[in-house]
Image: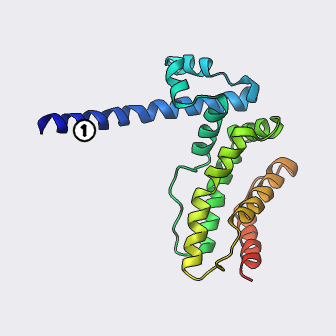
Amino acid sequence: MTGDATSAGDTTVKKRRGAPVIDRVLDLSLEAIAREGMDGLSIPEIARLAGLNKTSLYRRWPTREALVAAALERAMGHEEEAPDTGTLRGDLVALIERAANWTGSPAGTGVLRALLSAPGPGEIMSRMLAGRARAPETVLKRAVQRGELPLDTDVRLVLTVIAGACLQRLMIEQTPISRGFIEDLVTLLLSGMKR
């Protein structure tokens, strides 16, 4: 029994120690993409900067695309819990604000430019689309359960509209995503979803 307790304790310590290392690798990856674009990201170089063996990185992220997708998922808050403000409007505003805070930062803008110039969507965009849907899907399903939205709400279409509007604002108009813009976007979304 004592052996089991020690084993469980060791696992907890390893997990605690592992999280900062993972965070460091993902931060270094984002910095490299923002600075040099997709072609500038090298797993051996990220491993060197993080003070790790490259095989450790390859074990967790077997391809450069997998590493980029994981870094983007964390940076944009995909690993965070879905907001629960009690209303669909509040939840959508919180979700968009979370994404806007990162994408509007210098690192976020650099990474978005690199992603948009990358040839074809590939593994990165596939993983991003899958990861991107977790929190919004939770928010929208909760709204359906509360009777705020119809059962057949197209989650993917809602996400596409949000992403398209935010990218237009940031990359084409080169205007920050303000709270007013987010409120107006959510009003437009809600009027379209509540048929």
The quarter in which the C terminus is drawn is bottom right
Residue 106 visible? The answer is no
The quarter in which the N terminus is drawn is top left
Residue 80 visible? The answer is yes
Q: Does residue 160 appear left or right of residue 47 in this picture?
A: right
| Above or below, comparing residue 27 to residue 87 in the picture | above
Q: Does residue 90 appear left or right of residue 162 in this picture?
A: left
Residue at the image position 12 percent from the left and 36 percent from the top: 2
| Above or below, comparing residue 181 to residue 107 in the picture | below
Residue at the image position 46 percent from the left and 29 percent from the top: 21
What residue type is disc 1 on? Ala
Q: How many discs appear? A: 1
State which quadrant residue 184 falls in: bottom right
Q: Does residue 24 appear left or right of residue 167 in this picture?
A: left
Q: Residue furthest right?
A: 172
Residue 154, horizontal then vertical, whole percent: 71, 69
Residue on which the image places disc 1: 8
Residue at the image position 64 percent from the left and 51 percent from the top: 130
